[in-house]
Image (cartoon, grey):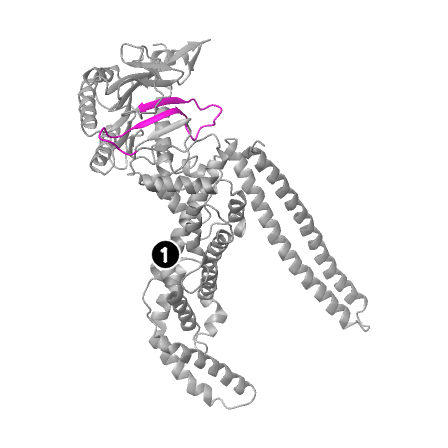
């Protein structure tokens, strides 16, 4: 039996969830009407019997009925909210499959860094970004872990382990849905790093005083009851200075503990985290690697599951947040409220504090894996890349039928790109051209190792898109995710790009100077532990042709000497002469266009050799400029 296509499975589940949401909506309306009717009925009965002898039992029955309806209504509203969140989960999933996903989900804007070697150029974060496409994380730690994976390459062993875990989680649709539905999919405030720091802090309150504090609070409450019943007020007069002295002694330390917890998170955020962990804990995993990860959440040294431990902390956090309430302030002296909360927090910290780091790490890891497993499930044609051990010949990138992951599949044009020494199993054909390169159906087939491609082409021919296609698929591969290709083999790489370089009035920099600084940043990667994959778009376009030609040759020479691989696009055909200086290692390829029916046409296919014409004048004439 053929597997059900993801879009069909989502459609089936969406119909079920929509029916459930509609049923709860009807119940919600009926219960709201019933509450109103009960209230109005009680008013009418009171008006009719006014001046007579109304039955207390009738009012009591009406009050009981209203209370029961209110509870039922509240539960129905919560169920409706969850059902609507499930509907949204499958609608968003269908939108991703059908390439209608831009504008849905978290953008990861907070992870943008202009000095990152490739994230801005490749649209890793922001609206319409790779992060927005793949992220299904509901907690900050999940988003942070996924952002970290998309921002830096992992070791081969770690990438392979991620691939195994993603494959094991790929069909866990129910788990991804339940995590999306908890707390109706809300994203609450949790600061993982401050929470870990707070949990691991040393105790600052004397533990032996906690029983004394509890007894003093109980004694004060008893003294108040005695006085209200006509007894003496001397016990209160005796206890009050003791409470004030303890409050003066412990207030600063108590406030530090409570404020530290409040600044790290909120009770609603901890409640969400607890619910997410609970869903992970109750999932029966069978893949060994995933089982080992989930086991880190199921129990601590004292046998308490992570979800229960976090739920307890959520209650303590709720108490901490309520200390500003007027009633809590009234209890500050008689009950030593803040001190009591601080002791409860310290007790929790002593019991579970050392486990929080591992809990946060495991949740972040699991949510990042679930995000990528969802991406893998929704893109079944995308394979996992093959990671190659780096050899003496340096970096390698061998991709067949690469397409841009952020473009609709129906319109994205694929090309094949090979850089560096080919894998022994690479099905490259022998060369059939004088330059040693052949092309068939958008596929580059080098007979000798090609380390750098110089891509020439006219305006709008797709040079920048080609660069982003290579870069984004490398990012996905090095994060452990599937790639938009029929096959990709590569060694571990450090990706560096220079695709966007505009002037900055605020910083007083020209576009050329901005580009030079960017190239300097990428050259710094050459000193790192991994070989570099560089992508330079319109290299040094801000200077004159002579300087551009000399500087470009120097950069290419340096990249080759440092065993980097990469691509350079250009409008300046003088740069294509560099290939003759480094035969075999540097090759010229191009993207072309043609005019048809008065319109500029592009096929976005990579071809051997140098572009033979420019479309700049033609474009200007097409819009009515007399040139």
Graded by Cα atoms within 10 Å as few (under 14), some (14 to 19) or many (20 or more), the crowding at tag 1 reads: some
User: Between 440 and 86, which is closer to the camera in this rendering?
Assistant: 440
Q: In this view, does 623 lie to the left or right of 552?
A: right
Relative image position of residue 198 (x, y in whole percent): 35, 61
Q: In this view, does 538 lie to the left or right of 407?
A: left
Question: Foreground residue, 129 or 493?
Answer: 493
Q: Which residue is drawn at 56% across and 42% down?
A: 88
Q: In which quarter of the image is the C terminus?
A: top left
Q: Report the side of 50 relative to 414 (left or right).
A: right
**Label 1 residue SS:** helix
Instruction: Tell me, yes or no, whether the highlighted magenta stretch contains residue 287.
Output: no
Residue to which mark 1 is pinned: 357
Is residue 227 placed above or below 624 in the rendered structure? below
Magenta-span inclusion, residue 413? yes
Residue 623 lies, in percent from the top left, at 41, 14
Q: Is residue 625 visible?
A: no
Q: Position of residue 614 (x, y in %)?
A: 33, 12
Q: Is residue 32 left or right of residue 193?
A: right
Q: Residue at the location (38% across, 80% down)?
A: 244
Image quarter hosting the N terminus: top right
Q: Relative to residue 256, is residue 112 depicted above or below?
A: above
State the residue at coordinates (39%, 18%): 442
- The magenta segment is 389-418
Quarter residue 355 falls in: bottom left
Magenta part, dominant SS? loop
Q: In this view, does 20 lie above or below 308?
A: above
């Amino acid at each position: 039996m053929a597997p059900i296509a993801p879009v069909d499975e989502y459609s089936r589940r969406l119909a079920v969830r929509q029916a459930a949401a509609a049923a709860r909506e009807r119940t919600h309306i009926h219960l709201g009407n019933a509450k109103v009717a009960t209230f109005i009925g009680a008013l009418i009965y009171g008006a009719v019997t006014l001046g007579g002898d109304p039955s207390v039992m009738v009012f009591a029955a009406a009050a009981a009925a209203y209370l029961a309806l209110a509870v039922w209504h509240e539960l129905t509203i919560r169920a409706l909210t969850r059902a609507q969140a499930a509907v949204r989960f499958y609608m968003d999933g269908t939108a991703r499959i059908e390439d209608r996903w831009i504008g849905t989900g978290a953008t990861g804007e907070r992870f943008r860094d202009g000095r990152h070697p490739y994230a801005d150029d490749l649209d890793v974060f922001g609206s319409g970004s790779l992060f927005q496409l793949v992220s299904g994380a509901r907690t900050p730690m999940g988003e942070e872990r996924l952002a970290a994976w998309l921002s830096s390459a992992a070791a081969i062993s770690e990438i392979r382990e991620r691939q195994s875990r993603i494959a094991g989680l790929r069909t866990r649709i129910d788990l991804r849905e339940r995590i999306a539905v908890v707390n109706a999919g809300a994203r609450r405030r949790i600061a993982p790093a401050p929470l870990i720091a707070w949990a691991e802090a040393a105790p600052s309150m004397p533990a032996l005083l906690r029983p004394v504090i509890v007894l003093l609070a109980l004694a004060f409450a008893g003294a108040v009851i005695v006085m209200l019943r006509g007894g003496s007020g001397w016990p209160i007069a005796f206890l009050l200075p003791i409470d004030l002295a303890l409050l003066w002694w412990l207030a600063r330390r108590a406030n530090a503990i409570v404020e530290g917890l409040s600044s790290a998170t909120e009770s609603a955020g901890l409640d969400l985290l607890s619910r997410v962990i609970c869903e992970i804990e109750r999932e029966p995993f069978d893949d060994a690697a995933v089982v080992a990860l989930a086991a880190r959440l199921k129990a601590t040294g004292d046998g308490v599951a992570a979800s229960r431990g976090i739920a307890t902390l959520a209650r303590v956090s709720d108490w901490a947040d309520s200390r500003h309430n007027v009633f809590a302030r009234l209890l500050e002296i008689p009950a030593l409220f803040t001190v009591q909360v601080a002791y409860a927090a310290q007790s929790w910290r002593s019991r579970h504090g050392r486990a929080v780091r591992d809990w946060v790490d495991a949740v972040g890891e699991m949510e990042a894996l679930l995000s990528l497993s969802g991406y893998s499930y929704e893109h079944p044609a995308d394979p996992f890349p093959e990671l190659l051990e780096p050899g003496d010949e340096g970096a390698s990138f061998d991709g067949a039928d690469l397409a841009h992951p952020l473009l609709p599949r129906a319109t994205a044009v694929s090309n094949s790109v090979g850089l560096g020494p080919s894998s022994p199993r690479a099905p490259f054909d022998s060369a059939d051209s004088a330059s040693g390169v052949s092309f068939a159906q958008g596929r580059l087939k080098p007979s000798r190792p090609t380390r750098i491609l110089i891509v020439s082409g006219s305006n709008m021919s797709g040079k920048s898109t080609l660069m982003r296609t290579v870069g984004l698929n490398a990012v996905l591969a090095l994060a452990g995710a599937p790639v938009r290709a029929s096959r990709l083999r590569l060694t571990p790489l450090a990706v560096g790009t220079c695709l966007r370089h505009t002037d900055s009035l605020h910083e007083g920099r020209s576009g050329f100077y901005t580009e030079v600084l960017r190239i300097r940043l990428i050259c710094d990667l050459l000193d790192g532990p991994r070989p570099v994959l560089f992508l330079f778009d319109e290299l040094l376009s801000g200077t004159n042709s002579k300087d551009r030609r000399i500087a470009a040759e120097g950069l290419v020479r340096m990249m080759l000497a440092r065993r980097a691989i990469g691509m350079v696009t250009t409008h300046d055909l003088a740069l294509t002469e560099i290939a003759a200086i480094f035969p075999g290692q540097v090759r010229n390829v191009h993207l072309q266009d043609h005019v048809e029916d008065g319109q500029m046409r592009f096929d976005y296919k990579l071809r051997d050799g140098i572009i033979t014409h420019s479309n700049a004048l033609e474009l200007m004439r097409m819009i009515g400029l007399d040139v």
